[in-house]
Amino acid sequence: MSKLTYNFGFALGVVAREFWRAMKKSNIRPADQAQAKSHGLLPPPCVPDSMVREMDHLPAMVRAKGVDLNLWYAANTRVIEKTTRKPRSRGKAQQLTPAAC
C-alpha cells in the first residue's frame, strides 16, 4: 500500500466519522444570534481632572516618595571616560591580500 493510498483512506475515514457523528446528534438547534447589549452608564471618575493632569507630568517616584530627580540622577549615574581605539595594524591585511590573488 502506498503512502498516498493510506493518506487518502485515512482522510476518507475521518470525513465519514465526522459525518456520522453529526447525523447522530439529535438535539441540533440553530445558533443563537448575539444581541447587542446597551452598556450601562459608567460611574464618574473618582479622581478630578486636575489631579490626573498633574499625575501625568510627574513620575511616580516623585509623587510617592518626594524624590528630587536632579539629586537622584547625580547620585546614581557616573560619567564614562571614552578611550580612543587603536588603529588596526596594516601588516596582517597586506600579507593576506597578495596571497589571495
Image (tube, grey):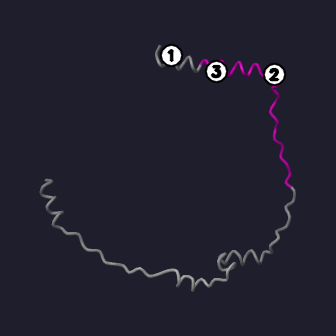
Position in image of residue 33 (x %, y %): 82, 38
Residue 91 image-quadrant placement: bottom left
Q: Mark 1 and mark 3 in contact (Cβ < 8 Å)? A: no
Query: Which three-letter amino acid code belongs to the residue tagged 1?
Result: Thr
Q: Residue at x 50, y 80 (%)?
A: 77
Query: Which three-letter amino acid code belongs to the residue tagged 2?
Result: Ser
Local crowd size for mark 2, using a 10 Å CA cut-off: few (<14), some (14–19), many (≥20): few
Please give the residue where the numbered disc 2 appears in the rendered image.
26
Local crowd size for mark 1, using a 10 Å CA cut-off: few (<14), some (14–19), many (≥20): few
Q: Residue at x 67, y 75 (%)?
A: 60
Above or below 2: residue 57:
below
Image side of residue 49 versus residue 68, left or right: right
Q: Residue at x 60, y 18 (%)?
A: 12
N-terminal label among 2 and 1: 1
Position in image of residue 49 (x %, y %): 78, 75
Query: Which three-letter amino acid code belongs to the residue tagged 3?
Result: Val
Please give the residue where the numbered disc 3 appears in the rendered image.
15
Q: Nearer the viewer, residue 22 or 64?
A: 64
Image side of residue 42 versus residue 96, left or right: right
Local crowd size for mark 3, using a 10 Å CA cut-off: few (<14), some (14–19), many (≥20): few
Please give the residue where the numbered disc 1 appears in the rendered image.
5
Q: Distance between the residues labelled 3 and 1?
A: 15 Å
Q: Is residue 86 magenta?
A: no
N-terminal label among 3 and 1: 1
Q: Nearer the viewer, residue 40 or 64?
A: 64
Tell me the SS state at disc 3.
helix
